Image (tube, coloured by chain):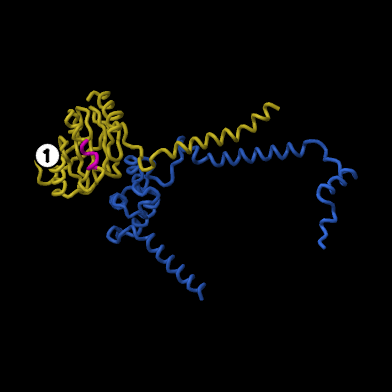
């Protein structure tokens, strides 16, 4: 019973979360042309709201985000391409307005750094393993004397037997 | 053997380097963004005055010919109130300060200026915030330093602090020949 109730609550919560995610773009902003509106949504998801910095302007309720959504739609209606709109915004707010940073020399570290670190680590491990495999013949087995001492240290085989 | 030991040092050095980088990152304020407008000419704009006040608003051509500050403010913005005495003091020293009144109601902007004083040579009212977006403004207050050629040379995000004024703003204005 409690499990069922939990499930119901989870569904209610998920439904609520779904609604809140869509809430930022208010109905009066939506363009009549569904193709343009689709493009506006796609652009809005790529553009950072500079006030609440980890939200896109499509998600954010901040007033600046609303203004930027409006600008995106106005320019779409005026016939601008996606690249022109992105250029318009980066000229004012820099690359920071893009949620996905562009690939250019200043961001190479960001884009390729993790792969390089992974490669370096992989090379290091490969080198280490190869060197270890090469290092001399395998050790000889324990002699009878060594085996006896080991057993004495470990308390002898009899201690393993429980009464 | 020596070389081998140095090899083991590499991860330690990398770790220290990354640690220092991250530690420096922690001391920086993530809400302060660098301006994309630096060293660019001020955007072309023309703003009307605050309704019910004298004067003829503010436009790009007002910002050429001398070093000046452009302060984006609003009566509803508390940090603006905090920095206002500094602007008054700067105006008294003869620094040319222009204002962009961001998304404000005229009567409230007027009351604010009457109460706190008016440090601005001219004020443009940006009621829908469009011109401010052309300036790359993403919050109020912001303060721009404009050189005599009408180019943006610096931007302060958030309320000016006395330290900013003494250590950055005034030396910069002096250096630019204001």
Quadrant of the image occupied by residue B171? top left
* Residue at left offset 34%, top offset 55%: A36
Residue A6 falls left or right of residue B74: right
Q: Nearer the viewer, residue A68 or B111?
A: B111
> Is residue A73 shown to the viewer in this render?
no
Q: Is residue A48 magenta?
A: no
Residue interval drawn in magenta: B80-85
Q: Quadrant of the C terminus of chain B?
A: top left
Residue B18 in the image: above or below residue A163: above
Q: Chain of mark 1?
A: B
Residue at the bottom extreme of this rendering: A1
* Residue at left offset 36%, top offset 45%: A86
Give x and y (percent) for residue B98: 19, 36
Residue at the right extreme of this rendering: A144
Residue B42 falls left or right of residue A114: left
Count of marks, rendered view? 1
Give x and y (percent) for residue B63: 20, 32
Q: Nearer the viewer, residue B10 or A98?
A: B10
> Is residue A162 shown to the viewer in this render?
yes
* Residue at left offset 60%, top offset 35%: B11
Q: Which residue is mark 1?
A: B56
């Amino acid at each position: 019973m409690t499990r069922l109730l939990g499930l119901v609550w989870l569904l209610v919560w998920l439904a609520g979360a779904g609604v809140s995610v869509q809430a930022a773009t208010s109905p009066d902003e939506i363009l009549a042309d569904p193709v343009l509106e689709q493009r506006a949504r796609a652009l809005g998801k790529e553009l950072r709201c500079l006030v609440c910095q980890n939200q896109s302007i499509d998600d954010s309720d901040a007033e600046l985000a609303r203004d930027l959504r409006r600008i995106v739609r106005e320019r779409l209606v005026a016939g601008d391409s996606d690249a022109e709109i992105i250029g318009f915004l980066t000229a004012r707010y820099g690359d920071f307005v893009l949620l996905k940073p562009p690939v250019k020399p200043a961001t190479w570290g960001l884009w390729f750094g993790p792969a390089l670190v992974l490669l370096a680590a992989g090379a290091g491990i490969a080198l280490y393993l190869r060197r270890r495999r090469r290092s001399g013949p395998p050790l000889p087995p324990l002699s009878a004397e060594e085996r006896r001492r080991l057993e004495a240290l470990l308390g002898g085989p009899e201690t393993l037997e429980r009464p | 053997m020596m070389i081998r030991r140095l090899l083991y040092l590499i991860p330690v050095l990398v770790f220290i380097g990354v640690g220092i980088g991250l530690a420096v990152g922690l001391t920086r304020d993530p809400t302060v963004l660098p301006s994309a407008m630096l060293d660019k000419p001020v955007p072309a704009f023309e703003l009307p005055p605050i309704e019910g006040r004298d004067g003829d608003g503010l436009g790009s051509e007002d910002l050429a010919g001398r070093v000046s500050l452009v302060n984006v403010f609003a009566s509803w913005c508390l940090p603006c109130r905090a920095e206002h005495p500094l602007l008054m003091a700067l105006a008294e020293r003869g620094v040319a300060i222009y204002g962009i009144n961001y998304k404000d109601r005229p009567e409230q902007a007027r009351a604010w200026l009457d109460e706190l004083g008016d440090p601005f040579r001219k004020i443009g009212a940006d009621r829908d915030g469009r011109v401010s977006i052309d300036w790359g403004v993403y919050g109020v207050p912001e303060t721009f330093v404009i050189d005599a050629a009408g180019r943006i040379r610096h931007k302060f995000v958030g309320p000016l602090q006395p330290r900013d004024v003494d250590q950055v703003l005034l030396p910069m204005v002096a250096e630019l020949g204001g």
